Image (spheres, grey):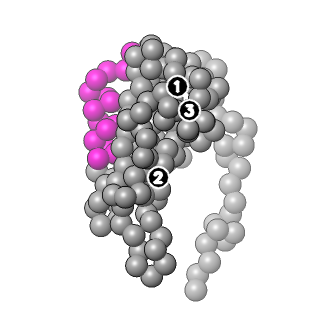
């Protein structure tokens, strides 16, 4: 899909099917994350695919925003692996993880699947259920699936600020 078309069409889908997703589609989504640009190419992020019924049940105890999905991708950044800007000690782990997460979100849509960026979850409890996530700043959960019939854009989806409100030419 052409990029500008993809970013215009993508929306936060809150009704998903748990129909199985082809392995090659998830592989392309993971490849999009792997290729995401990061500061000094340190790649200080991890993606966890939560797929088994037992793992999905645990994840559902950390957020009510599962939307019927059969697959969840959790993204986190690891501060001690990230580049740090010398002038103010700003650690870029969360920025790099967000870049990878954005690639994931767009790749999901490009595969004909749907999702939404879920930030409303109990990160400490998620780390308790999945100890391999400890040490990461968990920034997003992506419920992934085919859009269900009632999966339509929010009425607010097309409400956007004008370019002059978000861009200032200096």
Q: Earlier in the sequence, mark 2 or mark 3?
A: 2
Point out the tag, 1 or 2, that comes first from the N-terminus. Answer: 1
Residue pointed to by mark 1:
59
Vertical comparison of 9 with 128: above or below: below
Residue receiving disc 2: 98
> Residue 120: within the magenta?
no
Q: Which segment is the magenta one?
A: 20-34
Counting other residues with Cα less than 10 Å from the Cα at mark 1, is it few (<14), some (14-19), or many (20 or more)? many
Distance in Å between CA atoms under marks 1 and 3: 9 Å
The residue closer to the viewer here, 21 or 131, is 131
Image location of residue 12, percent across then percent down: 59, 37
- Reading the chain from its start, which is encountered first: label 1 or label 3? 1
At 28% from the left and 50% from the top, the residue drawn is: 35
Residue 15 in view (yes/no): yes
Q: Is residue 79 above or below residue 111?
A: below
* Location of residue 125 in the rendering, given as x and y in whole percent from the top left corner: 56, 32
Residue 9 is situated, as x and y percent measured from the top left of the image, at 53, 41
Name which residue lies at 64% across and 34% down: 153
- Disc 1 secondary structure class: helix
- Report helix, strand or loop for mark 2: helix
Which residue occupies the foreground of this view, 125 or 26?
A: 125
Which dot marks residue 125?
Answer: 3
Q: Are marks 2 and 3 in contact (CB under 8 Å)?
A: no
> Percent position (x, y) of residue 15?
60, 23
SS for callout 3: helix
Q: Nearer the viewer, mark 2 or mark 3?
A: 3
Q: Quadrant of the N terminus?
A: top left
Most prominent secondary structure in the magenta stretch?
helix
Residue found 64% across the figure and 68% down from its top:
166
Give the label, 1 or 3, closer to the camera. 3
């Amino acid at each position: 899909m052409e990029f500008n078309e993809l970013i215009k069409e993508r929306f936060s889908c809150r009704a998903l099917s748990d129909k199985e997703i082809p392995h090659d589609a998830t592989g392309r989504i993971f490849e999009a994350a792997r290729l995401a640009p990061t500061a000094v190419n340190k790649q200080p992020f991890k993606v966890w695919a939560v797929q088994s019924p037992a793992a999905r049940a645990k994840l559902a105890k950390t957020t009510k925003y599962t939307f019927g999905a059969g697959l969840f991708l959790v993204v986190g950044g690891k501060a001690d692996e990230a580049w740090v800007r010398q002038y103010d000690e700003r650690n870029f782990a969360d920025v790099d993880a967000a870049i990878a997460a954005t690639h994931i979100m767009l790749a999901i849509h490009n595969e004909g699947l749907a999702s939404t960026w879920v930030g409303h979850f109990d990160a400490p409890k998620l780390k308790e259920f999945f100890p391999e996530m400890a040490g990461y700043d968990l920034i997003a959960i992506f419920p992934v699936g085919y859009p269900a019939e009632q999966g339509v854009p929010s009425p607010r989806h097309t409400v956007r600020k004008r370019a002059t409100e978000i861009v200032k030419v200096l």
